[in-house]
Amino acid sequence: TTGPVFTSIAFANEASDGYINNSEKALTSDLVGNPVTSGASATSYVVIANSGTCSSASGYSATKPKLDDFAMSGDGSWKVCVKLEDTAGNITYGSSAAVVKDTVAPTLASGFTWGGPAWDAYLNATERITSTAILSVAVASESSTYKYLLVTSSASCASATFSSSSLPAANSSDITVDGDYKGCVQMTDLAGNVSVASTTSNVNVDTAAPTATMTLASRCTNWKPRSCLRQL
């Protein structure tokens, strides 16, 4: 006889993008939605490593697994096995695609150093009006997207608000007054883990030209007043 038919099962909620990140790993949302099947009178589930075989897995439960399922004990690729059974006892197995559990945020691996007009760690008035980038691109330890910002040297990159994916230029609006600035980069990996890093040195913005003052020494110092008048 023909057993139940399994068509598909999709990840749901925070796992709908195929990832579980560090901020999602403890959530109790359903990991998957309802399976697309026919002919089944009972449905049960279990989470196993993506390399495993559903027909040899144990621990099936009628309850859908959650994002915090204990079987996903570490980072890696996992899948949800579905066991279908009809009233005659025929059994069919199916599975989801892989979901990647990744709880480690990216780190800055290389790049993100001063360049362009700021190669010497200074920006003068002439350089300040140019639109040339003053930082090299950041390279993270894993595939990531980036956002950049300049803040004063005393500010914290961790509490900064990032909005631009473009490298800061010499004429960046982030620079509001002369002084020392540092670069900040926000890195977000494919799973959505976020980390922030800063440049290892500052750039000094100095747009004020130097001024000179002159003090003339009097030839009359220690002279008698009338002699001094004659000299002047």
Image (spheres, rainbow, N blue to C red):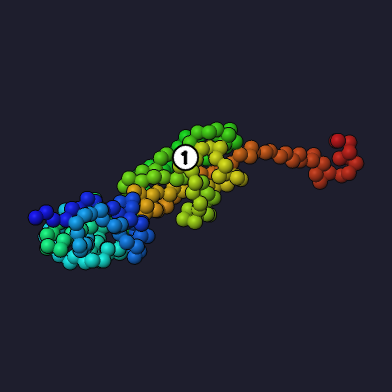
On the rendered image, what quadrant is the N terminus found in? bottom left
Please say if 205 is above or below 24: above
Residue at the spot 33% in from the left edge and 53% down from the top edge: 16
Left or right: 135 with respect to 208?
left
Residue at the spot 30% in from the left edge and 57% down from the top edge: 33
On the rendered image, what quadrant is the C terminus found in? top right
Q: Position of residue 71 (x, y in %)?
A: 22, 64
Q: Position of residue 63 (x, y in %)?
A: 26, 66
The residue under label 1 is: 166
Q: Position of residue 30 (x, y in %)?
A: 32, 61
Q: Is residue 155 visible?
A: yes
Residue found farthest to the left: 1
Residue at the spot 56% in from the left edge and 37% down from the top edge: 171
Q: Is residue 199 visible?
A: no
Residue at the spot 54% in from the left edge and 47% down from the top edge: 180
Q: Position of residue 12 (x, y in %)?
A: 33, 56
Q: Nearer the viewer, residue 123 or 28?
A: 28
